Image (cartoon, rainbow, N blue to C red):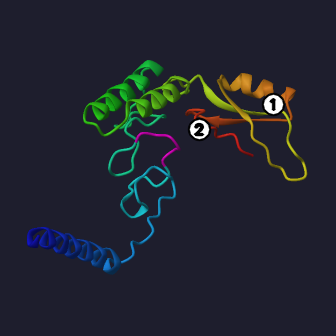
Amino acid sequence: MPCRLLRHLALAACLVGVLTVAVSAPARAQVVDDDGDGVADDVDDCIDTPPGDLVDATGCSVCPCETQADGSDWTSHVQYVGCLAAATHSLVRAHAMAPKARRALLKAARGSSCGNPNLTRCCLFAHLDPETETAVGKCRVMTPAKCDDAAEKLDYAEDEGPGSCLPNPCVF
């Protein structure tokens, strides 16, 4: 019986210690991450990373859309997708990324204009509310000339430059 009582007292003391630590722990400051890349602004070297980009610990894109990390041009769209495939494969093997997240990132990369200077993202708006001037358009990867042609057929079309349509950049 005394052993059982001692165990209960030890457990109670442990719980009181945990509660004391939890109550006396200082409130954490809210982390600011303006570009939403998962790296706090105070340590983010690239404060305007495009949404959905795979970033390193410093908040910079591992495989930037417009050029390779070293600043040289991508030789092709396949090379760009290959960069992301290799980087995400390593992360999945290290258990730092879920396979499902890898598949979503690679899907966005395959549907992007990255690595192909002849393509752009075009935001197509069929109905633009003139009063509020707000709309969500459809993003399509196409040539800049086709994007210009679409502008003549729809209420509004805008060339968004290189990148992915996931997440949708077409919010007016």
Q: Secondary structure under badge 1?
A: helix
- Callout in the foreground (2, 1): 2
Q: Secondary structure under badge 2?
A: loop
In reply to whether residue 53 is colored magenta, the answer given is yes
134 over 1 or under it: above or below: above
What is the quadrant of residue 54 in the picture?
A: top left
In reply to whether residue 112 is colored magenta, the answer given is no
> Which three-letter amino acid code belongs to the residue tagged 1?
Ala
> Which three-letter amino acid code belongs to the residue tagged 2?
Pro
Task: Kindly identify the residue that appears in the image at 36 percent across and 60 percent down.
Answer: 43
Residue span colored magenta: 49-54
Front residue of 133 and 73:
133
How far separated are the C-alphas under marks 2 and 1? Answer: 22 Å
Q: Position of residue 53 (x, y in %)?
A: 46, 40
Task: Kindly identify the residue that appears in the image at 46 percent across and 55 percent down.
Answer: 47
Magenta highlight: main SS:
loop
Q: Alpha-carbon neighbours of circle 2 within 10 Å: few (<14), some, or many (≥20)? A: few
Task: Kindly identify the residue that appears in the image at 26 percent across and 77 percent down.
Answer: 16
Q: Which residue is mark 2?
A: 167
Task: Kindly identify the residue that appears in the image at 38 percent across and 32 percent down.
Answer: 72
Left or right of 62 on screen, residue 147: right
